[in-house]
Image (cartoon, grey):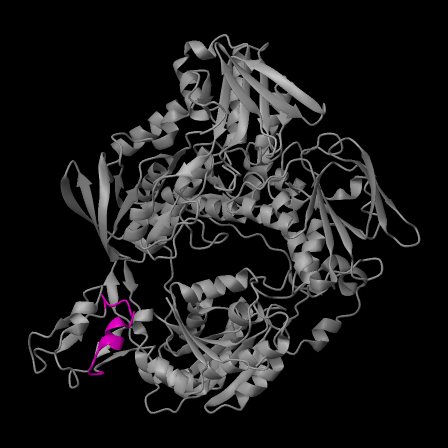
Amino acid sequence: MRKAAYVQYAQAVPLKYAIDSANCIYFQKGKCRACEKVCPTKAVDFTQKPETVELNVGSVVIAAGFKPFDPSRFDSYNYANYKNVITSMEFERMLSASGPSMGHVARPSDHKDPKKIAWFQCVGSRDLNKCDNPYCSAVCCMYAIKEAVIAKEHAGAGGLDCSIFFMDMRTHGKDFEVFYEGAKKQGVRFVRSRVHTITEDKATKDLSVRYVTEDGALAEETFDMIVLSIGLETPPETVELAKKLGLELTSGRFAQTGSFTPVSTSREGVFVCGAFAGPKDIPQSVVEASASAVSAGQALAEARGALTKTKEAVPETDLRGEPPRIGVFVCRCGINIAGVVDVPSVVEHAKTLPGVVFATDNMYSCSQDTQDTMAQIIRDNRLNRVVVAACTPKTHEPLFQETLINAGLNKYLFEMANIRNQDSWVHKENPEAATQKAKDLVRMGITKAALIEPLPEAELDVNQTAMVAGGGISGMSAALALAGQGYETHIVERSDRLGGQALNLHKTWRGEDIQAKLAEMVAAVTKNPKITVHLGTEIAGVDGFVGNFKSALSKGGQTTSLDHGVAVVATGAGELRPSGYAYGKSPRIVTSLELDKKFMANGALVTGLQSAVFIQCVGSREPERPYCSRVCCTHSIESALEIKRRNPDAGVYILYRDIRSYGERETLYRQAREAGVIFIRYSVDRKPVVEAAGDTVGVTVFDPILGRTVQIGADLLCLASAVVPNDNTALARFFKVPVNAQGFFVERHAKLGPSEFATDGVFLCGLAHYPKPIDESIAQGQAAASRAITLLARKKIRMNGQVAKTNPALCSSCGVCVSVCPYKAPSFTTQGPFTGKAEINPVLCKGCGLCVASCRSGAINLKGFDTNQIMAMLEAM
Amino acid sequence: MSEFQPKIVAFLCNWCSYGAADLAGVSRLQYPPNIRVVRIPCTGRLSPKFILSAFRRGADGVWASG
């Protein structure tokens, strides 16, 4: 129970307390004002009133989010009465280091460590009987698996038995299927059953359930805790807001959008993102956030920058002649570090080291309020070197450097000690050694910090042109968004036609005609004066770097060069050519895309079909392709319905492993069942058997509900074949970006950076990232453009200051640096007193240090990784 | 010899192995706490002098990865 004076949550921005007047004694009874008396800064103001602020805006983005479903109304689960029945959100809080139990899982009834926990899926989702939520909430399967795995890890050697009761396991996100398989290996039990009732033992508060197992037997089991995997819903206030704004809602009470306008509402100028536009996970919400930002900005492109205020730059303190005054901040990272490493002793150790004038610990060093506090400490203590012992510089160095800048320090006067990713997380069983290692790493960091110096950064113009690799749906939507904001954009398409895979598709799950919409999009691209389309063209090479790329475009043996500041990779994917199920043995056995083509051509095969069978997961969710292709379940259901529309009496069967009609696609699944499409589940070790015999296709499958083998003679067999990435090796090499084991590109951050690469200036969208349907491809195309525009809009970028520099007095002009540098940064000076000596262009230098290590005269140093600094670290070890 | 705890200096390239070591943490892979990582911008930066110096400072092993 929170107090009347509260902060929303530990990482809230701004991190300020508020008073909950409904629970405040003063507001309710007119007496108390205790908070006012104790507040040292006199910040409490009881006279504050809600005020109405009027804003004049050109576009509106609604990111109203969702409310977790309240399961109190399910009387058979007794969430309201049984203490040990909790929601997944409550369990999530329990697992959180900054949560009420500091990350420790305890039974609410007796605070004992649970030994056996069950998760019930689809509570408040896929349910029209007990609640009015026909849709799938899309995130619960994955979060339940995650919670089970973390809880098991947390329990450690003590052991924890985790079971997940589910209907269909929907792990359709990138890398989710691998996580699901990993959870099985770690011992999480998956039970395909929907449990009806929970009963509580009055004395022990244990919970027992009865359920039907997959083979039809009745089972009874007792659990210490049951977690209800509650769904997402739109709260009544948001429905009310939508009404006021005149926005159309779907049957599931989410904002109505279109597949080709995924972030546009029914009202012009009003855009939407996140769970209010349908239940979705973090990466998809982040994609939509960027997409809605670019869409909202498009109408306002002309006015861009008109009302912005330039942040006042804090002048850099001149440190010349000052001895090092080092400040050390050791991060607890909740319990991530402090749960293993003895943080106070690390702080004490730091205080003993030469040059250190200040050392402390932080709960979360990266939170906004800690950043402000750190800047204040830097100023108050006149610190001129800062060491943060926390996570990894790879993700957090820029953030802390920003803090230094705000405190008036050159950002290079910073050093990080990695005591989380490379210490507390990997030595959990050995806290003593981990603490020692943390001390060593902090000492090494401090020793280096004493020797680091402020570095200048070279400034460079950003070429205001964009290149989009790939002219499919996502590439075109990226190009349209970039051009819409006024940037010259070049689409490079390998084939001789725009459209990509969408050219093969018939209808979206919402029933939109893809060819008609695609033609509109192609026309918009072709007509746009800012977009140049290069058909039949391949990228033969890429030189340069963020802001200043130079790509070689090859067309019919001719190579031209294109200068551009940013690149969007939208190279798409293809359909796997199936290798089993008698594919190729009969014209009646087709893939999903082949079937769509037949629908579009109204070919003889699809008119007058009497029976059709679909087999799902052909090539997906297999050891050689351990991912879900995400689009096939919905695609097959849509095609099945198309067959039913053409002939309602046709027998249509979908053979599946899990139906993954996530989000509001679930309504299509229901429609299909209502239309009489028959769904038969098969297991991966008992796949359907196909025989092509003359004019029919024989399919034999074991039906687990009937408990017997079924034989179907079909006029058509459609194989829902996997989405496979194109060969991206060359492009990956050109842009120095990674691809994963399956050949899809790897984004900057799986959750927070889904539409960009870790390489600056290169962005990502569409099927090349992961299989996804049209609406998500378009949203990601817009998102990639949005991210690219944040860079283009800056017009100038600053180069890394950690570059090599020669000392001409020591240079012997041997030329080794000139020959070893992969970036052509060193050259011989052509004039002045040092003619003939090597010099290094700081703009071209990537700071790799190859020339430094190769220089036989010791004439080159690498700022930020200098020889004396590394030697000092070794000495301190 | 079972008491012997080697001290190993690891020179890790910022762009690959250092990131991999971070990923090992994210994946909660457990390994012995005997290494001390020195982040370098590229293994190209690894001067042989660093390796010799590490041994001179008492390291039992040096691991260069990039």
The percent coordinates of residue A499 (x first, y second) are 33, 30
Residue found 8% across the figure and 83% down from its top: A833
Q: Nearer the viewer, residue B47 or A47?
A: B47
Q: Which residues are magenta?
A: A843-858
Residue found 16% across the figure and 68% down from its top: A819
Screen quadrant of the N terminus of chain A? bottom right
Helix, strand or loop: magenta stretch: loop
Residue A171 visible? The answer is yes
Dividing the picture into quarters, in which one does residue A18 lie? bottom right
The percent coordinates of residue A162 (x first, y second) are 72, 51
View extreme (top): residue: A608
Dividing the picture into quarters, in which one does residue A802 lie? bottom left
Magenta span includes A424: no
Q: Nearer the viewer, residue A832 or A794?
A: A832
Magenta span includes A852: yes
The percent coordinates of residue A280 (x first, y second) are 56, 42
Residue A382 visible? The answer is no
Q: Nearer the viewer, residue A360 or A30?
A: A360
Q: Nearer the viewer, residue A504 or A583?
A: A583
Residue found 75% across the figure and 57% down from its top: A22
The percent coordinates of residue A117 (x first, y second) are 76, 51
| Vertical comparison of A423 with A748: above or below | below
Q: Indicate left or right for A430 with A852 as reference.
A: right
| Vertical comparison of A836 with A551: above or below | below
